[in-house]
Image (cartoon, rainbow, N blue to C red):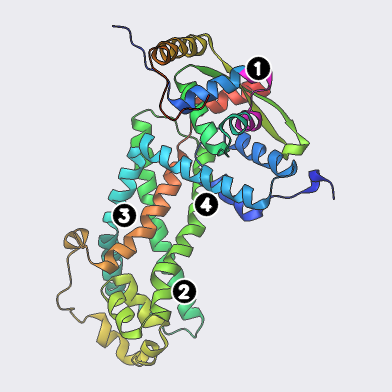
Amino acid sequence: MTDRSYLGEFELMILLAVLHLGDEAYGVPISRELEKHRGRGVSVGSVYAALERLEAKGLVSSKLGDPTPERGGKAKRFFQITRAGLRQVNETRRVLTRLWQGLPELKGERP
Amino acid sequence: MTMWTVRPPALATWLLQHFTFGEVDEALAGDLLEELRSGRSAGWYWGQVLAAISVSWRRDAISCSSACSFAALWAILTPSWLLVVSQLEQKFHFHAHIWRMDWPWSTILDLGALLLANLAYILAGIALFLLADLWLRRNLHTAAFLRGMRASLPVMVALSAALIILPMRFLAEERSTNLLAEIPVGASIITHIHPIEVARIPPQETWEAQFGEKPVANRPSPLAAISDRREPAILVRLPFFLVILLALRGARSNLGRRQLDAQDRA
C-alpha cells in the first residue's frame, strides 16, 4: 500500500492557481485567481495557511522576493510547485477524472 | 492623494502584527497593504485582518497544544498565588505602610505592587515553560518571545481592568463588592479604590491592630484555591491565561524558516 494522501479541495485549488500563475505566484495573485474562478471572496490569511500546510508536506516551495515600496517595504513570498506537488496534482486529477467519467448526468446540472 | 500614500488602519495593522503567529506574517501584511493601495476599502482590510487572526489562532491551537495546556495550568494555579501574596501582605503589614502615604500615592503604589506581583507570577511561568522547552530542544526565538511579551502586557492591563476593576465600579455595588471580596486581589482593590469602602478604612493607628495580626476565619489554603471554580476565581484566571498564552505563542517560532528567509535576502 502506498503512503499517499489526497489533496483537499482548497489545497488543490491553490496548487492549480500556483501552476496557472507560474513565476508570479504570491499571496495577492493567488487570492485573485481563486476569487475569479470561485466567484466569491477569499481570505488571504486562509490562502497562506493552506500554502504553509502544502509547504510542510513538500508540495510547494517558497522564497522571498525583494521588498517593494507599494507594499510598505515588505517582501513578497513567491510560491512554486515542487515535483512532488506536481505528481500529487496529476494523481488527484487522474482519480477525479475517472470518478467523474463514471457518473451519469447529474440531476439539475446545467452544462 | 496617490494610492501609494493610502495608509492602512493603524489598529488593524497592530493587531495583525501582534496577534498572528505564522511565519509568513510579513508577506501577508505586504499583500494586504498592496491590495489596499490597489483600491480595496478599509473595511476589506479589517475583514482580512480579523480572518487572518482567526485562522492563525485556530491553526495555532491545534498545532501548539503544549503552550495552551501550560497557559491553562498556570492560570488554574493563579488563585493560589494571589492567596500567597495576600498572606504575605498581611504578614509584613504592607498595606499599613502604604496607606500612611497621601492619595494618590497610596493607590498608585498599591496597584503598582499588585501589578508587579502578577507580572512576577507570569514571568515565572514563562521562564519555567522556556526552560522545559529548551530542555526538550525545541526552537525558540528571543525576539519573537519579546514581541509576544510586548503584545501581552497591554492586554493584561486591559483585561484586568475589564474583568476586575470596571465591574466593581459600574455593576451593582453590593454584588460586585461581594464578588471581589471572595478573591484576595479583589479585596485589596475594594479597600483601596471603591469610594464607599475607602470611607470605611479605619484610622491609621488602628489599622495594624485590625488587619495586622487578626486571624481571618475560613481562609482557604493555597491548595484549596486551585480547585476554586467560583465566578470570581474564573474571572481572575482568564487574564492570566490569555497573557501567558500570548507570550508563549510569541516565543514559538520556526527558527529554521527565519534562517531560510535571511539566506533568501542575502
| Relative depth, front residue between B253 and B103 | B253
**Distance between the alpha carbons at the discs numbered 4 and 1:** 38 Å
Q: Where is residue A55 in the image (x, y as percent from the top left)?
A: 50, 22
Q: Disc 1, disc 2: CB below 8 Å? A: no
The residue under label 2 is: B109
The residue under label 1 is: A22
Secondary structure at badge 2 equals: helix
* N-terminal-most mark, 4 or 2: 2
The residue under label 4 is: B151
Residue at image location 59% in from the left, 29% down from the top: A37
Magenta-colored span: A20-32
Query: Residue placed farthest to the right in the image?
Result: B1
Q: How many marks?
A: 4
Which amino acid, by three-letter code, is at mark 3?
A: Ala
Q: How crowded is mark 1: few (under 14 residues within 10 Å), some or many (20 or more)?
A: few
Residue at image location 53% in from the left, 48% down from the top: B50
Q: Disc 3, disc 1: CB below 8 Å? A: no
Left or right of residue B206: residue B250: right
Residue at image location 54% in from the left, 38% down from the top: A45
The residue under label 3 is: B75
As for residue A30 lying within the magenta part, the answer is: yes
Which mark is in front, 3 or 2? 3
Say if residue B93 shows up in the picture.
no
Q: Quadrant of residue B84?
A: bottom left
**Distance between the alpha carbons at the discs numbered 3 and 1:** 49 Å
Secondary structure at badge 3 equals: helix
Please tell me whether residue B176 is drawn above or below residue A9 in the rendered image.
below
As for residue B106 lying within the magenta part, the answer is: no
Which mark is in front, 4 or 2? 4
Q: Position of residue B124 (x, y in %)?
A: 36, 50
